[in-house]
Image (cartoon, rainbow, N blue to C red):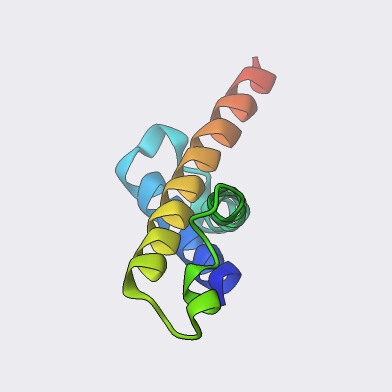
Amino acid sequence: MELIISLIAGAVGGNVAGGIFKNINLGLLGNSIAGIVGGGLGGQILSMLGAGGVAEAAGGADIGAIIGQVASGGVGGGVLLAVVSMVKKMMAK
């Protein structure tokens, strides 16, 4: 369940970042793909740091863990979108 939350939050985060910062916008599909990958990576990094898995270990849905997954997925999606956009612009030169 954590991965699904991170992927969805990543897609949203990528599209929000692309909408706010027009210079890194890769279009709807590009923003979504970069966001999904970044959200998955962000969620996995959070899990490796020990912050993930708390809700499943407790046997329920802890709102703090869900908020953490949404935040890490959204931020991860936005960050990866910015990185991909910078790499794309550097390769075009």
Q: Position of residue 40 (x, y in %)?
A: 60, 57
Q: Quadrant of the C terminus?
A: top right
In the image, 49 versus 27, the foreground residue is 49
Which residue: 55% across, 70% down?
2
Q: Residue furthest bottom?
A: 59
Q: Farthest residue toward the front? A: 58
Marker count (numbered): 0
Q: Quadrant of the N terminus?
A: bottom right
Q: 17 above or below 1?
A: above
Q: Residue at x 47, y 75 (%)?
A: 55
The reply, left or right, for residue 17 in relation to residue 8 is left
> Is 5 situated left or right of 71 in this image?
right
Q: Residue at x 39, y 59 (%)?
A: 68
x and y, in percent, of residue 27 in the image? 51, 51
Q: Position of residue 72 (x, y in %)?
A: 44, 52
* Quadrant housing residue 3: bottom right
Between 33 and 65, the one lying in front of the other is 65
Q: Residue lying farthest right?
A: 91
Q: Nearer the viewer, residue 64 or 93?
A: 64
The one nearer the camera, 57 or 75, is: 57
